[in-house]
Image (cartoon, rainbow, N blue to C red):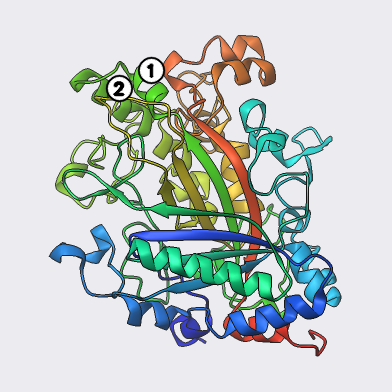
């Protein structure tokens, strides 16, 4: 069955982004009230947007520039809702689904749970993903260890500030009337530069390299077209090497659903630009090297500016002459599937900025950042893999290039950490060998993004949401 046939049953914001200028997020605790949780979900399921609902709510191209580049606005007064349920929330609703969820280890254990490190030792997800120091979970504002666990994560979207505010208040009221507890909520807003391009707080054009989904006509597609099973359970994924462990087989009720990775991350924009040199062309150039693109999104690879902004590879630039090997986009998307198998590590990113816009000419330290929101079929292979094996591996990508037949002159080269989301120099010295850290270029340390919350949820299909709200056992 083609994914386009089933798209209306898949929750909105997965295959087709919600769009709109504003989004809000809300986390709930079901306490131990199964009847109340089911009653709440039964009512909410009738308001959750499917993919076709998103299409109907979109109101043409944004300022005539084409939605593949800009995104489309929502019709006035339109509100879109997506519901994600955590492992604790799902098992409270229906205890029998625990056996179906446990094989998906990272989701089952959550962003605070135990993991196995590369040496086979038991550790924790925060330790492996770099959530240490200022990013320690004890400091988080959402998903923190203390207090009630998050059972549900709601995503709301609208194009008007008053509309999103009213929608958020309505969701809080409905949850409280059902006897649930609202743990946290926050609102984000799309920020744009002078050229009307969507940007994040460091000032870079954002959301450029999104993968397309094969079998579904994704108008936002501007990167590689990837098999639907990499994002939606129950569909064929990309072919995997024989030495890779197979992914768990999802239960029937999980088909059409997607795992949701949510992280609240603050950005030290003032510190970032101090590292880059302040202001002016020299600072812009240093920042472009750190990210791998100019502020307007143009690739640093020769000739790419005259083509599609994503129609390039790093072939011929293995040494990082044009795009440094430590550049953020190179760490996250190395663009050579035959070497890195990166088609199996991609994510559908649906995040939004929060906090006041940053002015480089009048820098301040007010809290601002990104409400990161992504959909994947495997948290281990996609989100966690990128942080564990690419972002904070100082020898990647050279190590992989050497291992898979593109041998470079210096086999012991240290490339550096991701300057955007990687470890700071202080954190690196606590976690990595001194002789390695001493060879990392100064510009190849991170430390400008701090994790202040995390939730792993599962966004079921619309039929599955209604099933989970009922009393009949989930078969």
Q: Is residue 73 above or below residue 6?
A: above
Residue located 50% across and 34% down the image? 421
Please rate how many residues cluster around mark 2, counting C-alpha atoms within 10 Å: few if below 14, some from 14 to 19, many from 20. some
Q: Is residue 226 visible?
A: no
Coordinates of residue 52 in the picture (x, y in percent): 41, 83
Mark on residue 21?
Answer: none
Position of 254 with respect to 310 (left or right) is: right
Position of 431 with respect to 444 (left or right) is: right
Coordinates of residue 381 in the picture (x, y in percent): 62, 52
The first of marks 1 and 2 along the sequence is 1
Q: Which residue position holds label 2?
A: 286
Hey, which quadrant is residue 424 in on the image?
A: top right
Mark on residue 275?
Answer: 1
Q: Is residue 301 above or below residue 93?
A: above
Coordinates of residue 475 in the picture (x, y in percent): 80, 86
Residue located 50% across and 44% down the image? 339
Coordinates of residue 449 in the picture (x, y in percent): 50, 33
In front of the other: 223 or 52: 52
Residue located 53% across and 30% down the image? 422
| Contact? badges 1 and 2 (CB < 8 Å) | yes
Please rate how many residues cluster around mark 1, counting C-alpha atoms within 10 Å: few if below 14, some from 14 to 19, many from 20. some
Cα separation between marks 1 and 2:
9 Å
Dot 1 falls on a residue whose secondary structure is helix
Dot 2 falls on a residue whose secondary structure is helix
Q: Is residue 293 visible?
A: yes
Hey, which quadrant is residue 427 in on the image?
A: top right
Q: Is residue 23 above or below residue 44?
A: above
In front of the other: 144 or 445: 144
């Amino acid at each position: 069955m083609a994914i386009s046939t089933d798209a209306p049953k898949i929750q909105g914001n997965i295959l087709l982004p919600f769009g709109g200028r504003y989004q809000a997020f809300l986390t709930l605790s079901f306490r131990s009230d199964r009847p109340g949780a089911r009653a709440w979900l039964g009512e909410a399921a009738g308001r959750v947007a499917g993919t076709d609902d998103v299409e109907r709510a979109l109101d043409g191209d944004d300022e005539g520039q084409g939605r593949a580049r800009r995104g489309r606005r929502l019709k006035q007064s339109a509100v879109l809702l997506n519901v994600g349920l955590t492992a604790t929330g799902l098992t409270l609703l229906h205890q029998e689904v625990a056996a179906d969820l446990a094989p998906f280890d990272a989701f089952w254990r959550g962003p605070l749970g135990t993991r196995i490190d590369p040496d086979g030792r038991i550790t924790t997800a925060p330790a492996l993903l770099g959530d240490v120091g200022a990013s320690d979970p004890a400091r988080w504002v959402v998903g923190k260890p203390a207090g009630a666990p998050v059972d549900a994560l709601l995503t709301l979207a609208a194009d008007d500030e008053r509309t999103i505010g009213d929608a958020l208040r309505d969701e809080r009221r409905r949850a409280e009337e059902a006897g649930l507890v609202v743990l946290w909520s926050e609102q984000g807003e799309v920020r744009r530069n002078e050229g009307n391009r969507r940007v994040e707080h460091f000032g870079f054009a954002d959301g450029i390299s999104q993968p397309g989904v094969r079998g579904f006509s994704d108008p936002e597609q501007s990167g590689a077209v990837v098999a639907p099973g990499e994002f939606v359970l129950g569909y064929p994924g990309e072919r995997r090497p024989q030495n890779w462990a197979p992914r768990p087989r999802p239960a029937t009720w999980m088909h059409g659903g997607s795992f949701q990775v949510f992280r609240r991350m603050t950005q030290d924009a003032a510190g970032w630009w101090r590292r880059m040199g302040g202001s002016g062309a020299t600072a812009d150039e240093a920042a472009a090297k750190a990210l791998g693109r100019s502020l307007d999104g143009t690739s640093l690879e020769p000739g790419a500016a005259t083509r599609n902004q994503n129609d390039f590879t790093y072939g011929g630039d293995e040494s990082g002459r044009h795009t440094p090997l430590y550049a953020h986009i190179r760490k996250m998307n190395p663009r050579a599937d035959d070497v890195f198998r990166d088609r199996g590590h991609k994510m559908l990113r649906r995040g939004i900025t929060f906090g006041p816009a940053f002015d480089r000419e009048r820098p301040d330290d007010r809290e601002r950042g990104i409400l990161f929101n992504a959909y994947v079929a495997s948290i281990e292979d996609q989100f966690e893999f990128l942080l564990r094996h690419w972002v904070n591996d100082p020898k990647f990508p050279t190590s992989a290039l050497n291992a898979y037949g593109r041998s470079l002159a210096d086999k012991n080269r240290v490339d550096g950490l991701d300057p955007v989301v990687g470890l700071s120099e202080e954190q690196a010295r606590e976690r990595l060998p001194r002789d390695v850290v001493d060879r990392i270029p100064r510009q190849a340390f991170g430390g400008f993004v701090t994790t202040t919350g995390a939730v792993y949820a599962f966004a079921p299909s619309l039929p599955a949401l209604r099933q989970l709200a009922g009393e009949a056992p989930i078969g």
